[in-house]
């Protein structure tokens, strides 16, 4: 019976009828959106349990009206599931509210891409509208008959059924998705790259076939430089051919591995932070461990971000935002007071450590500090927190905090950072043996407490994680000047190049902010490659190699892999049989003489020593694996762990892993995972770049050079190999770069030029080349999101670093690798002055400043000489002058940040810079006077004719 004035259902258009008790059905009590009961039940059965109007989830409710005949008021349990193809939902935790079981919708992790969100959202909306319209038609065809009670009850599953469905769906939800760059941005980018390549070919054809006879040496030099620049561009450009984005779903990770009522299935992670083994570090850790007992519970209780107290308390934000607990302000004030007291104690230690006592440092109990001699001391291990350490103030277990100082003795190589990391790998294997390892530099801090979970979305994915050796996070920095004068952020590298590599075989390891798969560090091949022939390349089949050493290594690796994949069989043996089996496989030759460590290396999924193990025995074994002679005659640093042979051990380590067939993942969460400090001083920045370039030259001159290493039997993709080749040849670009930046000054001083008079076709070629360079950069900025200022700063520092640090690295690298002259690098100083950006304006003279200073001066002198010559030569001289002056200003503009850095805070140039400038200016002035540009240039034939006339 129709009721006048009754509201209509917004889905099927039918009136909302009153029930027998005179009440109208209400689906959503928040907005009272009109929807009939039949459409509501259909909505629930279809799995859509959110109000169409306000988005509020439908709560469990008692059926009313005709369904209440039996007087049973048990509530229907309604569970919300989102479409796994569009969004990911968390496990819904049930709780009793007034005797009724209510299901709460979990937070939805949105994909950070407008294209994906709009497309998936529209698709879901259309499906829901289609089902609603179909339901409306079915109702009309049934002459508006009510749904029988038995059928309605049968449509609602039981609690047990819903739990099973929930578990199944949660396990099926993806942990991560790959979002390729949309074609509308990538297709034009690729097209312009091909066009630019064609224009380059035509350009070089013109340049080679049109030499400048009057300035042949200058022309030949420019041709060689331009060919090298084109080769360098190809190496840098084509690895960016297929960039991708990745998005993780942390909620799905929790739903899969942290189910309610069950122990957590998430894997453990060992954190490595490499720093000096000074007594100050040890005593600071004592204070830090005590402070952590209060700080960790506070962070967990109030979801503090970031969890580095110095940066948290220094934030200039509204710290009350999203904090609803009334006790937060009080506890935060108390915690800040605790932290200030902690800082006072640590700063007192730092002040005390400024002056070393003559008799050496002594510990609090009066015993001498074992590490007084930094090059000759025993190994030291101290467990502060964890299984044998203190708990937090609430009595909960804290993560284990262990201080490790490896043994150092004269006559033993310690291999700097790589050796320290390998020592940490062995110690952690004995004490904790987590399957994954996070590596951080000592000047970095965790900015996102969920960063490790982001990595686990890849490493613990059964489909994706099997072949992943590490997950690399981009480096982000604090304390950099707003203009980023010296390109410290490396935005172009981290936001463009690394995303391009992620579409091939994965990003390079950059030395910090990386979560490793422990098995990959042990030199194993990925599971999917275990049965493949090592002599087959990833792209093309190749002939088998006859390298005996490689065959031996491959056979040894096959034994190790067989041991891992037969782990279940090994577990069935008793301890004596296990030890005998390990001894028979001779793993000591690979991993060293430690049975405890070898057993841990055979555990595919990690797992520490049993709780019944004697802690003293474990500490003794840990001391043994960090002894200075442990790595002798083993594969440490050669095939397993961090690889030795270069000061940039990060490039070598990642390269070796990917040659075995592993791939890496690039993870860029919205909130930066880790942040660190960078050298903002010009000299410190150049020294940092010098060390990186020196490491690349060392790799180029070693057996691990990507030009030939594993070229026939490796599993490295060819575009990935191009990227690694680019990382080891870029320092050599400094030679043609310095020569090319010198050419403008020489052309202006001599009146010659490297390009002949341009024809119409040549003008089109030059214009097309310049336009293709500009358009390529613009389209690259478009798909990457990098701003044009970052790109320009990157270009400027490419010239600054190439004309100074890279140039020195080439010569130092050859001296070190060929002549044996060791060049010890200095660890980059990253501490700023008390004033903001004080280090930015501090001048620290170094020989690295000489080449760029020389280039600036000679180009300025050349510009002055060019204008003087044009004034003396008349109107016809101004046309050729334009190209030369433009060329010179191109060099000066690129070196402008360097020039600004030399001026200091108040534009006061240091005395040594002035002396160097006067010396160079004097030299070039003498050359200029010798050329004598003010004298009218007379043709030699005219002079001859004049002489003949006089003789007559």
Image (cartoon, grey):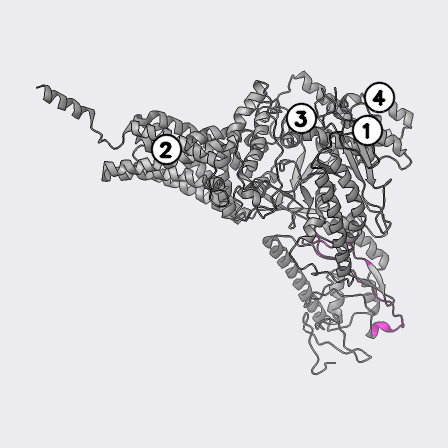
| Magenta-highlighted residues | 66-93
Residue 673 falls left or right of residue 157: left
Going from N to C along the chain, the mark reached first, 4 or 2, is 4
Choose mark 3 or mark 2, whichever is in front: 2
In the image, is residue 924 above or below residue 583?
A: below
Asked if residue 642 is positioned above or below residue 902 in the image, the reply reads above
Q: Depth check: 648 or 264 in front? A: 648
Q: Which residue was labeled with disc 1?
A: 623
Q: Upstream in the sequence, badge 4 or badge 1?
A: 4
Front-lying residue, 752 or 195:
752
Dots 4, 1 in contact, CB < 8 A:
no
Kindly identify which residue carries mark 3.
644
The nearer-to-camera label among 3 and 1 is: 1
State the CA–CA distance, disc 1 to disc 2: 62 Å
Image coordinates for residue 810, horizontal then vertical, percent: 53, 26
For the residues carrying marks 4 and 3, which lies nearer the camera in this image? 3
> What is the CA distance from the residue labelled 3 to the residue labelled 1?
22 Å
**Residue lying farthest to the left in this orientation:** 952
SS assignment at label 1: helix
Packing grade of label 4 (10 A; few <14, some 14-19, many >=20) is few
| Residue 76 is inside the magenta segment | yes
The dot on residue 583 is 4
Distance of label 4 from label 1 (alpha carbons):
22 Å
Which residue in the structure is indicated by mark 2?
745
Residue 64, placed above or below residue 161: below
């Amino acid at each position: 019976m129709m009721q006048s004035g009754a509201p209509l259902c917004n889905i099927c258009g039918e009136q909302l009828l009153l029930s027998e008790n005179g009440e109208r059905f209400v689906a959503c009590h928040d907005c009272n959106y009109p929807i009939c009961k039949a459409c509501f039940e259909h909505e629930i059965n279809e799995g859509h349990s959110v109000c169409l109007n306000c988005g509020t989830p439908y709560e469990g409710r008692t059926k009313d009206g005709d369904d209440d005949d039996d007087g049973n008021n048990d509530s229907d349990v309604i569970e919300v599931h989102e479409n796994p193809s569009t969004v990911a939902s968390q496990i819904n935790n049930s709780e009793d509210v007034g005797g009724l079981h209510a299901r709460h919708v979990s937070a939805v992790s949105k994909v950070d891409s407008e294209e994906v969100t709009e497309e998936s959202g529209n698709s879901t909306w259309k499906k829901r509208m289609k089902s609603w319209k179909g339901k409306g038609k079915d109702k009309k065809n049934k002459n508006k008959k009510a749904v029988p009670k038995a059928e309605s009850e049968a449509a609602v599953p039981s609690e047990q059924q819903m739990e099973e469905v929930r578990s199944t769906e949660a396990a099926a939800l993806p942990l991560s998705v790959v979002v390729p760059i949309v074609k509308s941005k990538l297709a034009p980018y690729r097209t312009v790259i091909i066009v630019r390549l064609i224009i380059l070919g035509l350009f070089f054809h013109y340049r080679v076939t049109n030499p400048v006879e009057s300035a042949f040496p200058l022309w030949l030099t420019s041709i060689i430089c331009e060919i090298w620049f084109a080769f360098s561009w190809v190496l840098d450009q084509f690895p960016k051919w297929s960039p991708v984005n990745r998005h993780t779903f942390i909620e799905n990770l929790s739903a899969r591995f942290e189910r309610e009522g069950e122990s957590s299935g998430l894997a453990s992670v060992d954190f490595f932070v490499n720093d000096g083994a000074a007594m100050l570090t040890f005593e600071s850790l004592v204070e830090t461990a005590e402070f952590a007992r209060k700080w960790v519970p506070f962070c967990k209780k109030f979801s503090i971000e970031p969890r580095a107290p110095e940066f948290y308390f220094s934030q200039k934000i509204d710290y009350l935002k999203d904090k609803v607990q009334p006790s937060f302000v009080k506890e935060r004030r108390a915690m800040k007071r605790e932290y200030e007291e902690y800082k006072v104690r640590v700063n007192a230690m730092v002040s005390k450590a400024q002056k070393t006592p003559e008799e050496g440092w002594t510990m609090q109990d009066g015993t001498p500090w074992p590490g007084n001699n930094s090059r000759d001391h025993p190994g030291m291990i101290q467990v502060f927190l964890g299984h044998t350490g203190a708990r937090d103030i609430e009595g909960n277990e804290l993560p284990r905090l262990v201080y490790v100082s490896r043994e150092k003795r004269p006559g033993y190589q310690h291999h700097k950072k790589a050796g320290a990391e390998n020592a940490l790998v062995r110690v952690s294997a004995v004490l904790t043996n987590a399957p994954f390892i996070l590596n951080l530099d000592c000047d970095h801090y965790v900015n996102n407490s969920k960063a490790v979970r982001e990595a686990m979305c890849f490493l613990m994915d059964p489909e994706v994680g099997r072949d992943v050796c590490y997950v690399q996070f981009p480096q982000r920095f604090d304390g950099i000047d707003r203009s980023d004068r010296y390109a410290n952020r490396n935005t172009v590298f981290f936001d463009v190049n690394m995303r391009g590599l992620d579409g091939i075989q994965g990003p390079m390891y950059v030395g910090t902010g990386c979560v490793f798969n422990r098995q990959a560090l042990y030199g194993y091949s990925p599971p999917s490659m275990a049965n493949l022939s090592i002599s087959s390349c990833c792209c093309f089949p190749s002939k088998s190699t006859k390298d005996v050493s490689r065959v031996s290594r491959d056979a040894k690796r096959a034994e190790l892999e067989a041991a891992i994949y037969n782990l279940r069989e090994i577990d069935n043996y008793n301890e004596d049989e296990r030890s005998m089996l390990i001894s028979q496989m001779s793993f000591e030759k690979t991993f060293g003489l430690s049975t405890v460590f070898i057993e841990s290396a055979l555990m595919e999924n990690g797992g520490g020593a049993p709780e019944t193990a004697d802690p003293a025995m474990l500490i003794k074994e840990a001391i043994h694996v960090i002894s200075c002679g442990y790595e002798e005659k083993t594969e440490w640093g050669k095939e397993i762990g961090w690889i030795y042979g270069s000061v940039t051990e990060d490039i070598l380590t990642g390269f070796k892993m990917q040659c075995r067939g592993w791939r890496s993942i690039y993870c860029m969460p919205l909130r930066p995972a880790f942040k660190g400090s960078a050298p903002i001083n010009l000299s410190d920045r150049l020294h940092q770049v010098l060390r990186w370039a020196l490491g690349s030259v060392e790799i180029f001159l070693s057996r691990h050079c990507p030009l030939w290493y594993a070229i026939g039997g490796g599993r490295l993709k060819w575009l990935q190999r191009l990227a690694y080749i680019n990382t080891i040849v870029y320092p050599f670009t400094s030679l043609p770069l310095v020569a090319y930046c010198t050419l403008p000054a020489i052309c202006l001083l001599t009146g010659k030029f490297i390009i002949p008079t341009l024809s119409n076709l040549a003008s089109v070629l030059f214009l097309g080349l310049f336009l293709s360079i500009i358009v390529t950069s613009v389209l690259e900025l478009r798909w990457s999101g990098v701003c044009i200022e970052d790109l320009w700063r990157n270009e400027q520092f490419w010239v600054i670093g190439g004309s100074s640090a890279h140039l020195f690295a080439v010569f130092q690298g050859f001296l070190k690798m060929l002549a044996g002259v060791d060049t010890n690098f200095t660890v980059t100083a990253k501490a700023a002055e008390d004033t903001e950006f004080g280090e930015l304006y501090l001048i620290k003279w170094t020989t690295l400043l000489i080449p760029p200073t020389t280039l600036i001066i000679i180009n300025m002198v050349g510009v002055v000489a060019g204008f003087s010559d044009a004034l003396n030569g008349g109107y016809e001289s101004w046309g050729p002058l334009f190209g030369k002056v433009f060329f010179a200003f191109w060099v000066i503009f690129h070196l402008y940040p360097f020039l600004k850095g030399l001026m200091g805070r108040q534009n006061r140039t240091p005395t040594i810079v002035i002396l160097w400038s006067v010396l160079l200016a004097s030299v070039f002035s003498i050359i200029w006077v010798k050329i004598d540009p003010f004298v009218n240039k007379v043709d030699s034939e005219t002079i001859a004719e004049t002489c003949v006339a006089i003789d007559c």
